Every structure is written in structure tokens, then in C-alpha cells.
């Protein structure tokens, strides 16, 4: 979906000024394209799952769509299937990591107040201990 100038994030404006698109230099796009080293837990045509480099719990996996979408605000009706795949993959990885029964949390941070740091949609899968921070 094309963005108007006023809608661009600061990070996108800075990338554009250097003659690059956000997707060119976006860290999660680059992980998806294997331009930076990572140890994927899962990968297919649409998604890649990698351990978070700063884990907040014993299990902390990021599930990342390969297509560049900033966050849920950027998800169109043709992308709904990707969201379903992300959630199903979270449950599958939770099962493989042995935390399906003990419990886990899935989180999508959106925008500044939501605490989003990387402007490429991603889902956090967290578990392996009782998670103490409640929502809000
Ligand atoms: P968020 O606040 O939802 O944008 O979270 C971004 C997450 O990405 C943080 O938990 C970071 O630790 C994680 N992160 C940033 N760069 C990388 C990377 N290269 N590989 C894995 N995780 C990363
Ligand atoms: Zn990206």
C-alpha cells in the first residue's frame, strides 16, 4: 500500500533520504533475506521465526512475516491469512519448546505507546517461566 509523505515514519523518511526504501535496510527484512546471520527456528515462503537477541523469558521467539509491514495498521485484507499463520506458528513453536501446557504469551507491539522498537510487524512468543508483567 503506497504511503503519503505525512504518513511516513521517521525511520522511513531517513531511509528515503539515503535513496533506500525502508524494506532495503529494515533489520527484519534483512533477516528474512538472509543478509544478516540468524538461527531460524522455522521458515517458509511467508514467515521466519528467530530467537530474540535480548530474551525477556527462557523462551522468546519472534515470528516475522517476510513481507515488510510496519505493524497491524499496515495489514490489509489480503494479509489476514498471514496473521492467522503467525498465530498458528506461535502455538506450534510453543508445543515444540514444551511450553504449550505450562502456558505462554503472544504479544504484538504497535507504535510508540505500544513499545514497538522495530518498525516491521512481528509477534513475540514468550514463556518458560511465569510471566510477571501484567498488561498495561
Ligand atoms: P518490539 O519492541 O516489539 O519492536 O521488539 C523488537 C524486538 O526485536 C526486541 O525484543 C529486540 O530484542 C529484538 N531484536 C532486534 N534486533 C534483532 C535481531 N537482529 N535478531 C533478533 N531479535 C532482534
Ligand atoms: Zn521490514
Image (cartoon, rainbow, N blue to C red):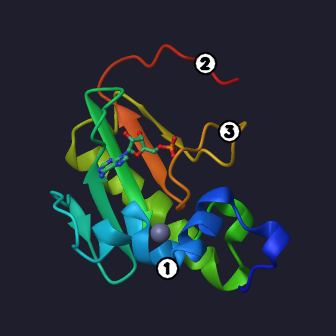
* Secondary element at tag 3: loop
The residue that label 2 is drawn on is 134
User: Depth-wise, is mark 1 or mark 3 nearer the camera?
Assistant: 1
The residue that label 3 is drawn on is 114
- Percent from the top left, x then y, of residue 22? 53, 72
Q: Nearer the viewer, residue 22 or 40?
A: 22
Left or right relative to 29: residue 35: left
Q: CA distance from mark 2 to mark 1?
A: 39 Å
User: Depth-wise, is mark 2 or mark 3 nearer the camera?
Assistant: 3
Q: Are marks 2 and 1 in contact (CB under 8 Å)?
A: no
Ranked by sequence position, the earlier of labels 2 and 1 is: 1
Q: CA distance from mark 2 to mark 3?
A: 14 Å
Q: Residue at x 18, y 58 (%)?
A: 38
- Percent from the top left, x then y, of residue 98? 22, 38
The residue that label 1 is drawn on is 20
* Secondary element at tag 1: loop
- Percent from the top left, x then y, of residue 63? 39, 57
Q: Nearer the viewer, residue 49 or 92?
A: 49
User: Depth-wise, is mark 2 or mark 1 nearer the camera?
Assistant: 1
Amino acid at each position: 500500500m503506497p504511503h503519503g509523505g505525512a504518513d511516513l515514519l521517521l525511520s522511513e523518511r531517513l531511509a528515503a533520504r539515503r535513496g533506500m526504501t525502508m524494506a532495503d535496510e529494515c533489520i527484519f527484512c534483512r533477516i528474512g533475506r538472509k543478509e544478516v546471520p540468524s538461527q531460524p527456528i522455522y521458515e517458509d515462503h511467508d514467515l521466519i521465526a528467530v530467537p530474540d537477541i535480548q530474551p525477556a523469558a527462557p523462551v522468546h521467539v519472534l515470528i516475522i512475516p517476510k513481507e515488510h509491514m510496519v505493524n497491524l495498521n499496515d495489514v490489509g485484507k489480503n494479509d489476514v491469512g498471514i496473521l492467522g499463520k503467525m498465530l498458528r506458528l506461535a502455538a506450534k513453536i510453543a508445543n515444540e519448546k514444551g511450553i504449550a501446557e505450562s502456558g505462554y504469551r503472544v504479544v504484538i507491539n504497535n507504535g510508540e505507546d505500544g513499545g514497538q522498537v522495530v518498525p516491521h510487524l512481528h509477534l513475540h512468543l514468550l514463556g518458560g517461566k511465569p510471566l510477571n508483567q501484567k498488561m498495561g
